[in-house]
C-alpha cells in the first residue's frame, strides 16, 4: 500500500504519479473495496494494479487472441532490460552512484519492480515502498527502460536528499521539473539541433520541461489545470536550475552522458 510518483506516458510524452496511503479511501486501505466506487484515481493508484496487492489476471478471451498471457515473458524481458541499463547506461550508473553516496543505495531486487501497469504510464516511483516500478507492458526496450529508470531515480534521489512530501503539489511539481529537465527533455534531439538560435533552443527546452512536468502533475493529482500550472510556474526557476546529481543537461548524441558519468566523482558521487 503506498503512494506513488511518476509515470511515463506511452508516446514520447509522459507524466508522473503519486499516491499516498493516507490519502486512499478507507475501504481500499482495508482491502474492502466498494466496487461501485471508482478506484482512487485521485492519487494515481489505479494506474498500478499490482501495487494494490492484485496479481494481474489476463482475460481468457484475450489469451485466445494471443493478446494477453505474456506477463511472465514480459517480466523476464523487463528485468533483463533493467539489468542491461544498470550495467551499460552511464546515466543510470551515475544515478545509482549518486543514490549510493547519498545513503540510499539501490538493491535491484528490493528497489526495482517490473509490473503490469495501466497503458497510460511507463513507470512510477512509490515513496512508501521506496520502489521504482517499470511497466513491463509499456517500456519494452532498453531505451525506454533507461528513460524510466533515470526519471524515477531523480524522484528517488529527491526523496532521499530533500525533505520531499509528494502530497505537497509544489514538491511534486519540483521533482517532476527536475526529472523532465535532466532526463526526458534532454533526450529530445530535434529541438536541440538544426538551425534554431540559441535563444530558441533554450526556450524550447524550458517549454518541454514545463509541459512535461505539467502532464506529470495532472496525471497523478486531481487538481485543476490552473492549479497545476501555478505550481509549476511557482517552483520553476529554482527547480529548473537545480541540476543535481547529473550536473548538466544532457544533449542527445553527444558525449554528455559519458562526461557527466566521468565527472561524478568530482561531486563526491561514488560511481
Ligand atoms: Zn515523474
Image: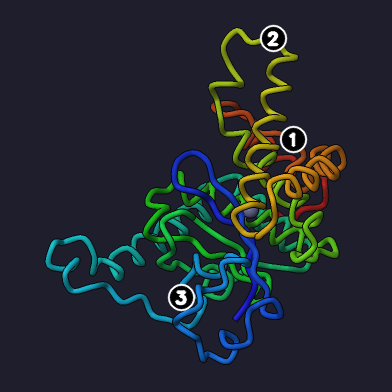
- Labels 2 and 3: the sequence-earlier one: 3
| Structural crowding at the residue carrying mark 3, measured as other residues with C-alpha within 10 Å and reported as few (<14), some (14–19) or many (≥20) | some
| Structural crowding at the residue carrying mark 2, measured as other residues with C-alpha within 10 Å and reported as few (<14), some (14–19) or many (≥20) | few
In the rendered structure, the answer to whether residue 79 lies left or right of residue 41 reads left
* Residue located beneath label 2 in the image: 197
Between 114 and 1, the one lying in front of the other is: 1
* Residue beneath the point at 48% across and 83% down: 53
* Residue located beneath label 3 in the image: 50
* Residue beneath the point at 49% across and 85% down: 34
Q: Secondary structure at mark 1?
A: loop
Tell me the quarter of the picture where residue 180 sits.
top right
Q: Alpha-carbon distance for marks 1 and 2?
A: 20 Å
What numbered label is drawn on residue 186?
none
Between 53 and 23, the one lying in front of the other is: 23
The location of residue 244, given as percent across then percent down, is 79, 46
- Labels 1 and 3: the sequence-earlier one: 3
* Residue located beneath label 1 in the image: 248
- Closer to the eye: label 1 or 3: 3
- Closer to the eye: label 1 or 2: 2
Q: Alpha-carbon distance for marks 2 and 3?
A: 46 Å
Q: Are marks 2 and 3 in contact (CB under 8 Å)?
A: no
The location of residue 84, given as percent across then percent down, is 45, 54
Amino acid at each position: 500500500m503506498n503512494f506513488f510518483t511518476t509515470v511515463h506516458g506511452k508516446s514520447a510524452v509522459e507524466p508522473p504519479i503519486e499516491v499516498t496511503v493516507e490519502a486512499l479511501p478507507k475501504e481500499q486501505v482495508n482491502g474492502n473495496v466498494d466496487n461501485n466506487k471508482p478506484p482512487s484515481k485521485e492519487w494515481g493508484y489505479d494506474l498500478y494494479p499490482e501495487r494494490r496487492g492484485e496479481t494481474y489476471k489476463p482475460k481468457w478471451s484475450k489469451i485466445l487472441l494471443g493478446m494477453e498471457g505474456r506477463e511472465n515473458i514480459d517480466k523476464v524481458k523487463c528485468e533483463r532490460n533493467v539489468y542491461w541499463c544498470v550495467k551499460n547506461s552511464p546515466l543510470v550508473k551515475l544515478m545509482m552512484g549518486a543514490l549510493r553516496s547519498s545513503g540510499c543505495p539501490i538493491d535491484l531486487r528490493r528497489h526495482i519492480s517490473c509490473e503490469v501497469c495501466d497503458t497510460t504510464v511507463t513507470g512510477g516511483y512509490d515513496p512508501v515502498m521506496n520502489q521504482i516500478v517499470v511497466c513491463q507492458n509499456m517500456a519494452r526496450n532498453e531505451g525506454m527502460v533507461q528513460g524510466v529508470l533515470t526519471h524515477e531515480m531523480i524522484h528517488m534521489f529527491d526523496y532521499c536528499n530533500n525533505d520531499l512530501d509528494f502530497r505537497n503539489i509544489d514538491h511534486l511539481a519540483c521533482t517532476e521539473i527536475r526529472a523532465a529537465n535532466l532526463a526526458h527533455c534532454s533526450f529530445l534531439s530535434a529541438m536541440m539541433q538544426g538551425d534554431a538560435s540559441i535563444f530558441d533552443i533554450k526556450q524550447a527546452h524550458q517549454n518541454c520541461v514545463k509541459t512535461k512536468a505539467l502532464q506529470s502533475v495532472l496525471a497523478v493529482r486531481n487538481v485543476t489545470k490552473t492549479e497545476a500550472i501555478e505550481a509549476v510556474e511557482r517552483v520553476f526557476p529554482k527547480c529548473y536550475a537545480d541540476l543535481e546529481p547529473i550536473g548538466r543537461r544532457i544533449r542527445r548524441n553527444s558525449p554528455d552522458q559519458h562526461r557527466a558519468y566521468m565527472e561524478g566523482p568530482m561531486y563526491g558521487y561514488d560511481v
